Image (cartoon, rainbow, N blue to C red):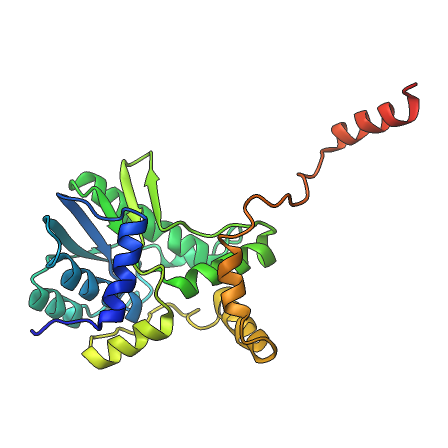
């Protein structure tokens, strides 16, 4: 299999790897593979990228089957074939958690699904001696998560390019954080990489999809809306936002001080 990437893609990945110190000599990296275009591209791109590094990095692909197709197991044959061509080991873990994800009133199903997938992958990495886990989140994901956090949870946050997990001792890396989703999709088509359909019944009917639609609609009036959102994730960290909301007891104490102090 002839493997190559456009120079612009390589430079963008290299920027993230260098800036956030994502890879180092001797890393054993577990690559999360959902079978979608982003994760398939991540495995392919990392395989190409690490071949040109001046130090060794080991890659392994892992897919988590949460049982959304209860009657049959997912067909991972195309992913397995790709991994064989890339010379990358491939592991599938089956966990019957679909009902728990889809029928839990306490938590959003997408958040719960993500939690289970991450937990299984992180635990497998810890148990099997992988010091890093790579996920395929790109710049669009980061901006969408940023906006979702503001709109749906009232928090100004998004995921980081690199996160050390104290509980497992594993470091999560996201080498695609500077790539746009359209760049990834174009490269996947050009390289004819295999893409699996999501088995989730909620696919394309999520809050993230609603945010994608919102950004597209805002872009019609302001072509710079995405760039401004991306800049807001990094700029303005020293700007004073509103202070935290005081509790009832704190308000009562301040009221007493305001009205009755001399």
Q: Residue at x 65, y 45 (%)?
A: 241
Determine which quarter of the picture holds residue 94: bottom left
Position of residue 120 measured from the top left corner of the image (x, y, whole percent): 28, 48
Q: Of residues 6 and 34, which is closer to you in this image? A: 6
Determine which quarter of the picture holds residue 59: bottom left
Residue 65 seen in this snapshot: no
In the picture, the quarter occupied by the N terminus is: bottom left
Q: Of residues 171 and 95, which is closer to you in this image? A: 171
Vertical arrangement, residue 80 with respect to residue 129, above or below: below
Residue 42 seen in this snapshot: yes
Vertical arrangement, residue 220 with respect to residue 111, above or below: below
Q: Of residues 180 and 37, which is closer to you in this image? A: 180
Q: Say left or right for 261 vs 209.
A: right
Determine which quarter of the picture holds residue 255: top right
Q: Residue at x 53, y 57 (%)?
A: 232
Position of residue 61 measured from the top left corner of the image (x, y, whole percent): 18, 57
In the picture, the quarter occupied by the C terminus is: top right
């Amino acid at each position: 299999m002839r493997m190559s990437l456009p120079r612009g893609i390589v430079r963008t990945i290299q920027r993230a790897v260098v800036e956030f110190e994502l890879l180092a000599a001797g890393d054993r990296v577990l690559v999360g593979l959902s079978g979608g275009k982003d994760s398939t591209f991540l495995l392919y791109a990392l395989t190409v990228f690490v071949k040109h590094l001046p130090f060794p990095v080991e890659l392994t692909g892992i897919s988590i089957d949460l049982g959304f197709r209860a009657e049959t197991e997912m067909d991972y044959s195309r992913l397995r074939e790709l991994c064989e061509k890339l010379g990358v080991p491939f592991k599938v873990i089956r966990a019957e958690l679909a009902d728990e994800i889809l029928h839990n009133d306490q938590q959003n199903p997408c958040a719960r699904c993500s939690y289970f997938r991450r937990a299984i992958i992180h635990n497998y990495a810890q148990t099997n001696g992988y010091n890093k886990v790579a996920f395929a989140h790109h710049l669009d994901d980061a901006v969408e998560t940023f906006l979702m956090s503001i709109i749906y949870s009232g928090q100004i946050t998004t995921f980081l390019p690199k996160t050390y997990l104290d509980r497992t001792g594993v470091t999560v890396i996201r080498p695609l954080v500077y790539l746009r989703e359209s760049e990834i999709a174009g490269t996947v088509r050009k390289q004819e990489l295999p893409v699996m359909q999501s088995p989730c019944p909620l696919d394309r009917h999520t809050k993230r999809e609603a945010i994608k639609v919102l950004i597209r609609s805002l872009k019609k009036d302001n072509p710079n809306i995405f760039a401004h959102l991306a800049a807001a994730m990094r700029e303005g960290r020293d700007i004073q936002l509103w202070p935290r909301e005081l509790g009832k007891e704190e308000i009562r104490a301040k009221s007493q001080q305001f009205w009755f102090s001399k």
